[in-house]
Image (cartoon, rainbow, N blue to C red):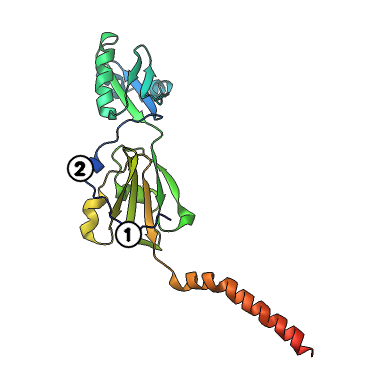
Amino acid sequence: MFKTHTDFVFDVPDDSASAEYKISPNDLLLFRLFTNDGARLLETTTGEANRFLALNDIYYPVEPDGMVELPEIGKMYVTGMTTIELQSILEDKYEALYNNPYAIVQVMNNRIMVFPGTGARASVVPLINRNTTLIEALALAGGIDERGDASKIKVIRREAGKHQVYKINLATIEGIKDANLIVQANDIIYVEPVPEIASEAFRDLSPFISLVSGLALIYAIVFGNI
C-alpha cells in the first residue's frame, strides 16, 4: 500500500502542518452554553452539574455549504474557524441573550486511520484531543508493529484539493521534532512494513512449485506403471 517511487519528492512539514484543526463541512459539532462565565461547571453539587451537561449534549452538523444552525441565533458560517475562534464568536452573539455566556465547542467526528506496519492491525482512531500529535496517535493505535519500519512513516493529508505526503523518521532521537506534528482529521498514518524477502519470495514462487510438483507426480504415476 501507498508505495512511492525512489525519486518521489516528499512534502516538508512546516508550521501550518501543525496548526490547529479548522472546522470543515460535514463536521459534527457538540455545542454547550453556560451562563455566568461557566460558574455552574465549578459548582460543588457535582451530580447536578453532570446532569446539566448531559442534557445539553446536542450535536449540530456543519452543512456542505459551511453553515451550521444553532439555537436562537440561527445559521452562521463556521468553516475555516478553529473551535477556540468559534467559541469566542458564539459568546459575543449570545451576550445579548444571556448573562456572561460561556461556550464550549468540540468537533466530534474527527478521526484518523493508522496502519502500524501490518494490514491486519489497521485502526480508525477518534481525535478526542484537538492537538493530538503523531506520536500520541501511534500510541492510541497500539504503537508501531514489530514488522513496522519506524524510519519510514508516511503521513498523508488532503489539503486544498491535493494530497500532501510527509515522510517521518522516528527510528532515531533526532526524529522527535517530527513526532510532535499535530495530526489532522482524516489523516492517514502509514508505517511501511519491513520486507520479509524469504517468505514473500516463497509466496510468489509457490504456484510454480505446486505446478512442478503436480507434473512430477503425474509423470511418476504414468511412467511408474509402465
What is the crowding at mark 1: few (fewer than 14 residues within 10 Å), some, or many (at least 20)? some
Query: Residue flagged by tag 1: what amino acid is it?
Result: Lys
Q: Using the image, determine if residue 66 lies above or below residue 196.
A: above
Query: Residue flagged by tag 2: what amino acid is it?
Result: Asp
N-terminal of the pair, mark 1 or mark 2, is: 2
Determine the residue positioned at 32% across, 30% down. 23
* Residue 48 found in image quarter: top left
| Residue 173 x/y as whole percent | 22, 59
| Residue 71 x/y as whole percent | 38, 14
Left or right, residue 54 beside residue 23: right
* Residue 102 found in image quarter: top left
Left or right, residue 199 beside residue 93: right
| Residue 144 x/y as whole percent | 37, 57
Between 38 and 114, which is closer to the camera in this rendering? 114
Contact? badges 1 and 2 (CB < 8 Å): no
The residue pinned by badge 2 equals 15
View extreme (front): residue? 7
Between 84 and 200, which is closer to the camera in this rendering? 200
| Residue 206 x/y as whole percent | 57, 72
Between 114 and 80, which is closer to the camera in this rendering? 80
What element does badge 1 sit on?
strand
View extreme (bottom): residue? 226
The residue pinned by badge 1 equals 152
Q: Which mark is residue 72?
A: none
Q: Quadrant of the N terminus?
A: bottom left
Determine the residue positioned at 30% across, 32% down. 22
The CA span between labels 1 and 2 is 21 Å
